[in-house]
Image (cartoon, grey):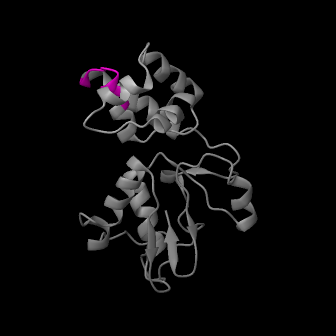
């Protein structure tokens, strides 16, 4: 994170915060956002990084490398989170997805996932996860017991951010302990909701 922040700071050369904010217009680039970005206090959102790169005069062809660097930082193993795994390597059963009913010729504990409207619609779970991944945020799934919230959440994460880290805390004490660690994505399940 600090290396990315240093590289971004070098990129601005001698431009002041006010010059960068002016160059970002009509978008906004507040001083507080620039301070967080250049000090390494927080990982910039994709949107903030794009505004900053444009304000620094980085041409479109060269921006992809900066976004790739941001993604590498976002995908780094989170410090202080025991047992964090990549989303695409997560064991859905350990996260609370219920096993399928046993039938002859069944393969594995889980049946193939059939995407539904709630998964794929323009305002569905995967679209919401994409927005949260780009800008920061939280997605809350609410429903009755055993309706598929956890499976829907995991399938959305695997489709949208498969390389992100996922952590399933054992209890509230682990959440409090990890509160000081920078989190990229986390999951915690209650009886009737799942949080991404």
Report x, y in % for residue 6: 54, 21
Q: Nearer the viewer, residue 111 or 182?
A: 182
Instruction: Name the residue rendered at 38%, 32% in the picture.
Output: 67
Residue 58 colored in magenta in the image: yes
Residue 172 visible in the displayed image: yes
Up-down relation of residue 46 to residue 147 (above or below): above
Report x, y in % for residue 117: 26, 72
* Extent of the magenta region: 52-60
Instruction: Name the residue rendered at 31%, 59% in the picture.
Output: 127
Up-down relation of residue 71 to residue 155 (above or below): above
Q: Quadrant of residue 142?
A: bottom left
Report x, y in % for residue 93: 56, 69
Q: Nearer the viewer, residue 56 or 18?
A: 18
Q: Residue furthest front?
A: 18
The tally of labels here is 0
> In the drawing, does residue 87 fall left or right of residue 23?
right
Instruction: Name the residue rendered at 42%, 55% in the picture.
Output: 158
Report x, y in % for residue 184: 53, 48
Q: Quadrant of residue 62?
A: top left
> In the drawing, does residue 158 fall left or right of residue 42?
left
> In the drawing, does residue 157 fall left or right of residue 55?
right
Up-down relation of residue 13 to residue 158 (above or below): above
Check the picture and name the quadrant holding the N terminus.
Answer: top right
Instruction: Name the residue rendered at 67%, 53% in the picture.
Output: 83
Residue 159 visible in the displayed image: no
Q: Residue furthest top?
A: 14
């Amino acid at each position: 994170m600090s290396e990315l922040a240093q590289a971004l700071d070098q990129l601005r050369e001698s431009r002041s915060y006010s010059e960068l904010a002016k160059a970002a217009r009509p978008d906004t680039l507040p001083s507080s956002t620039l301070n967080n970005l250049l000090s390494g206090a927080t990982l910039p959102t994709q949107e903030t990084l794009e505004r900053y790169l444009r304000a620094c005069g980085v041409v479109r062809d060269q921006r992809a490398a900066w976004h790739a660097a941001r993604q590498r930082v976002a995908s780094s193993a989170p410090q202080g989170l025991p047992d964090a795994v990549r989303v695409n390597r997560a064991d859905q059963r350990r996260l609370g997805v219920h096993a399928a009913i046993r039938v002859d010729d069944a393969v594995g504990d889980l049946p193939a996932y059939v995407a539904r409207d709630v998964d794929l619609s323009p305002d569905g779970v995967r679209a919401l996860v994409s927005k949260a991944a780009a800008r920061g945020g939280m997605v809350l799934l609410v429903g009755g017991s055993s309706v598929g919230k956890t499976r829907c959440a995991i399938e959305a994460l695997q489709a949208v951010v498969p390389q992100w880290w996922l952590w399933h805390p054992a209890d509230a004490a682990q959440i409090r302990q990890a509160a000081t660690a920078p989190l990229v994505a986390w999951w915690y399940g209650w009886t009737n909701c799942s949080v991404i």
